[in-house]
Image (cartoon, rainbow, N blue to C red):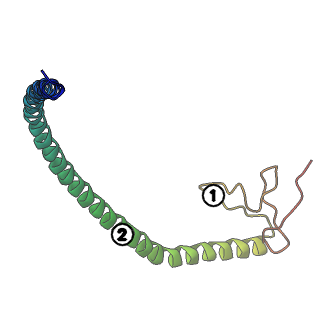
Amino acid sequence: MSAADVAVVVAAAVGTLGAIACLAAAFVLVAQVRRLERGIEALRHEALPLVAEARAAAGHAATEIARVDAVLADTEAVTAAVDQAAQLARRAFANPVVKVLAWRAGVLGGLRRLGGTEVRPTRAVPDRHRGQDRSGTEARGPHGRRTLTAPRR
């Protein structure tokens, strides 16, 4: 056998080994692709119900958000109505109440001047912060007006 024949035999052997290695790699790759397909199919069977469940939850959340939005709109309407009613009541009662209090103060001042004695009006709720000293008595000036005085010690 000549050197060329040996080179051809060696090349054929190397080519045959390469072909066998490629066939083995192809079989391994085909097995891996089939295994991957089975994994994808299992994932699809698990994921599709989860996606459907997520869609249902999103629809339920959208419905609840719409209900909360409606409740907020109703609350805002009620708040606006209460504010309007409060303003109306304030306008309706503020002026007469002020007039009654002014009339009462005038009558008490007149009685004080006529009788020369101290007439103290009774209060339903004591005024603790305006016009009183620390002893709890109201300080009044010569014309029956409140005055600022130093606390008694």
Q: Is residue 106 left or right of residue 153?
A: left
Amino acid under label 1? Answer: Arg
Q: Is residue 114 above or below residue 73?
A: below
Q: Nearer the viewer, residue 57 or 133?
A: 57
The answer for how far apart the CA atoms under marks 1 and 2 are is: 34 Å
Residue 17 locus on image (x, y percent): 14, 23
The residue that appears at 84% across and 70% down in the rendered structure is 141
Q: Position of residue 46 (x, y in %)?
A: 11, 32
- Residue at 16%, 48% in the rendered image: 60
Q: Which residue occupies the foreground of this view, 21 or 96?
A: 21
**Category of crowding for the residue at label 2, using alpha-carbon neighbours closer than 10 angstroms: few (below 14), some (14–19), many (at least 20):** few
Number of numbered discs visible in the structure rendering: 2
What residue sits right under mark 1 in the picture?
A: 123
Of helix, strand and loop, which one carries label 1?
loop
Query: Residue at horizontal 12%, vertical 33%?
Result: 43
> Which circle's residue, 1 or 2, is located before the other in the chain?
2
**Residue 74: x, y in percent?**
27, 62
Query: Left of 113 or right of it: where is 70?
Result: left
Residue 45 vertical placement versus 84 (above, below): above
Task: Establish if 31 lies above or below 146.
Answer: above
Callout in the foreground (1, 2): 2
As drawn, the label of residue 80 is 2
Residue 100 coordinates in the image, percent (x, y) = 56, 74
Please report contact status of discs 1 and 2: CB closer than 8 Å, yes or no.
no
Label 1 neighbourhood size at 10 Å, few (<14), some (14-19), many (20+)?
A: few
- Residue 45: quadrant of the picture: top left
The amino acid marked with disc number 2 is Ala
- Could you tell me which secondary element the residue under label 2 belongs to? helix
